[in-house]
Amino acid sequence: MTDEKRDLVIAGSGIAGLSAAVYAARADLDPLVLEGEQPGGQLTLTTDVENYLGFPDGVGGMELVQRGKEQAEQFGAAFRHGRIDDAALDGQPLELSLSTGDTIHARSLIVATGASARWVGAQNEGELMGHGLSTCATCDGAFHRGDDLLVIGGGDSAMEEALFLAKFADSVTIVHRREELRASEIMADRARDHDKIQFRWNTELEAVQGSQAEGVTDAVLVSHPDGYPREKAESGTAVERETVDVGGVFYAVGHTPNTQFLDGTGVERDESGYVFTQTDDAGRPTARTSVDGVFAAGDVADPRYRQAVTSAGTGSMAALDAEEFLETLRDASGSTVRATVSPDQSAP
Ligand code: NDP
């Protein structure tokens, strides 16, 4: 175990964290990026990205984050595996306890830990995610021209994804586990009124079938007139089971922001856990949170847009705000920390 001192720690190595790292390293802030559980973030689950500016022929999700990491490293950013398990943010320096057992005392922190798309637990979803099974219609929809698609979920995201996918697909079926939508009326009406979109009520996805080479080919659906058919099937109640030919399946069952480590820290979040960022005195957006020295970027603070390009934008904002904050601290104390590591005497 070590006790390390840093000017800036960036938690998360998706697009937001990488963009923050490039800006911070170029500003000579010597950032340390904690790569988290899923280095590279959600883009690593996407095959090709066609809507990221500057790549007219598209770019692989994995390639984009690898190039981002390389770019940040070239400017001097350091990367390390591990996530923050616990944080004490009520004064300087901020104390970050890592999953590795190490402690870092940091003057500033950029939270770029993202939000994880929820999965439904269907058979084969691990193998086929990114190969015809997707959690992002905007990212992957254009690969499904002329396909019959399923969208799983009954909220606004499911309606929005279905409407987007209907631009490319022959048909889109929204599969919802009960017969009442959670979506707002306006979004639900748009989906209901679309001639390519239909609904399967009281139905759930039990399995996706296909292969990484050929993508998704079939889906096994279970239905029960009283809803929640998988729960019923698991408890032994008879359910209807049907295999349907599909060219792709999209999950839209919500996201969970990765902010559990902020519990009790004073960083304000909404009821779902998304971090609130603050406006400046003139009411313009910043990446500052309610805690001094803590900034947020990317999906962790954005339940609305959730795009790679917006994450890159807010990542750069967070680094610029952190730079300004560190300058103010330096002006006040006349000192700088940079990276120092010392063995923790209390370590076993
Ligand atoms: P929601 O939590 O609103 O909806 C999730 C949906 O997925 C629900 O219908 C839920 O079913 C279903 N679901 C959850 N878990 C499972 C599961 N394991 N198997 C099958 N179905 C499941 O999430 P959204 O992402 O849709 O929306 C999040 C927030 O973002 C909302 O506030 C929404 O209004 C907002 N939003 C707004 C948009 C806009 O205004 N343009 C666009 C997109 C989102 P059940 O209903 O039975 O619980």
Image (cartoon, rainbow, N blue to C red):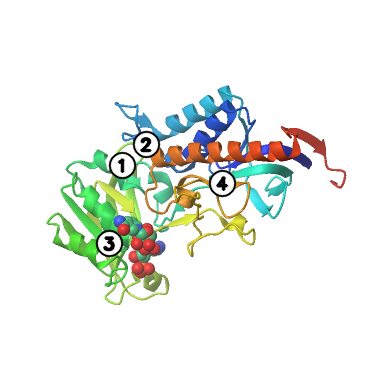
Question: What amino acid does circle 4 point to?
Answer: Phe
Q: Which residue is mark 2?
A: 47
Q: Which residue is mark 3?
A: 175
Question: How far apart are labels 2 and 4 at the CA level?
Answer: 30 Å
* Numbered disc 2: secondary structure: loop
Relative to 64, is 260 on the left or the right? right
The mark total stands at: 4
Q: Nearer the viewer, mark 2 or mark 4?
A: 4
Q: Please say whether residue 27 is visible from this viewpoint.
A: yes
Relative to 111, is 106 on the left or the right? right
Q: Residue furthest front?
A: 282
Looking at the image, residue 204 lies above or below residue 124: below
Question: What amino acid does circle 2 point to?
Answer: Thr
Question: How far apart are labels 3 and 4 at the CA level?
Answer: 38 Å
Mark found first going from the N terminus, 3 or 2:
2
Question: How far apart are labels 1 and 2 at the CA level?
Answer: 8 Å
- Give residue 140's mark: 1
How busy is the neighbourhood of tag 1: few (under 14 within 10 Å), some, or many (20 plus)? many
Q: On the image, which quarter does residue 311 sit in?
A: top left
Spot occupied by residue 142 in the image (x, y as percentages of width and height): 25, 40
* Numbered disc 4: secondary structure: strand
Q: Which residue is mark 4?
A: 295
